[in-house]
Image (spheres, rainbow, N blue to C red):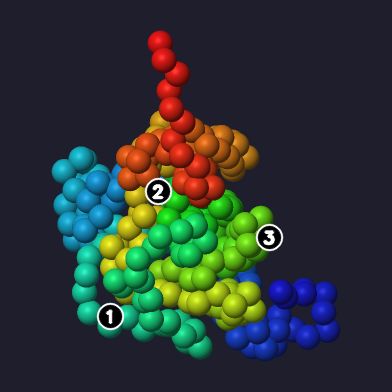
Amino acid sequence: MTNRPHRLSLTRQAELLGISRGSLYYQPQPVRADDLALRRRIDRLHMDYPFAGSRMMKGFVRQEGFTAGRLHVGTLMKRMGIEALYRRPNTSKPTPGHKIYPYLLRKQAVTRPNQVWAMDITYIPMARGFVYLVAVIDWFSRKVLAWRLSVTLETGPCLDALKEAIARFGKPEIMNTDQGSQFTSIDFIKALKDAGIQISMDGKGAWRDNVFVERLWRTIKYEEVYLRAYDSVSAARDGLRCYITFYNTRRPHSSLAGRTPDQAYLNLPKPIPAAA
């Protein structure tokens, strides 16, 4: 964004961009090994105890020998995109200029593919770092329609996944997301409106509004991520690609009468086993 050889001084460039001059000289520091270990543990505990906020999470990790205080635990949870999930009044303030849309799925029967899609982001730990996974899911069939990995919580990968899903599978009637800044951003909302998709957003911290996505994250993490120690982003991408293919095409779901997400999406019956 800034240009050191430019005739404008760095101070003036920072003023025009609305950023701190000190940030121009900041050198990114690698995440400490003890922080990575703590993040990995917080992620697992969040899967098991999604109602735990920073105070309770601090108690959990201290029981296991970590010395982090509540403020540090809360900071890590925020950086990971994790918060306690429970029903509470919506007192949060949206990002300035970002509109929050109402939840459209209450008492709505979802009976067919492409009626409702959902999107969300989750934290993926690696051996020496972390990435974020964003996915587009068909609510009826649980099929993962598109996904992306990213090293930051930004709008770009969400837009890329949305555009891929629409290009491959058409468009849904409704898209449901949480109130994250990626999904309330001007570019993301414009993409949904341009495609003629109705916009639905969860209440802040209301996990039941997007429960199928939360179940997907738990499944992916316990059946794939926590069994691996990805040593690079490319290794994480390859592992997740293999698992998501298995999830869509081979893994039966009890909630789908034993069918796979692909079979439910295409409205195919469960295959009848051959006689012995």
Residue 4 visible in rendering: yes
Judging by the rendered image, the residue that carries numbered circle 3 is 167
Judging by the rendered image, the residue that carries numbered circle 1 is 90
* Label at residue 216: 2
Q: Secondary structure at mark 2?
A: helix
Q: Secondary structure at mark 3?
A: helix
User: Where is residue 258, by image quadrant?
Assistant: top left
Badge 2 crowding class, 10 Å Cα cut-off, few under 14, some 14 to 19, many 20 or more, is some
Residue contact between numbered discs 2 and 3, judged by CB atoms under 8 Å: no
Q: Earlier in the sequence, mark 1 or mark 3?
A: 1
The percent coordinates of residue 155 (x first, y second) are 57, 68
The percent coordinates of residue 81 (x first, y second) are 40, 61
The Cα atoms of the two marked residues, 2 and 3, are separated by 23 Å
Badge 3 crowding class, 10 Å Cα cut-off, few under 14, some 14 to 19, many 20 or more, is few
The percent coordinates of residue 88 (x first, y second) are 21, 74
The Cα atoms of the two marked residues, 1 and 2, are separated by 25 Å
At x 39% / y 55%, what residue is drawn? Answer: 213
Q: Amino acid at mark 3?
A: Ala
At x 43% / y 75%, what residue is drawn? Answer: 200
Badge 1 crowding class, 10 Å Cα cut-off, few under 14, some 14 to 19, many 20 or more, is few
Image position of 237 (left or right of 90) = right
Q: Is residue 273 above or below residue 175?
A: above
At x 34% / y 70%, what residue is drawn? Answer: 108
Q: Amino acid at mark 1?
A: Asn
Q: Nearer the viewer, mark 2 or mark 3?
A: 3
Q: Is residue 86 above or below residue 151?
A: below
The quadrant of the rendering that contains the N terminus is bottom right
Give 207 or 79, whichever is nearer the viewer.
207
At x 30% / y 48%, what residue is drawn? Answer: 47
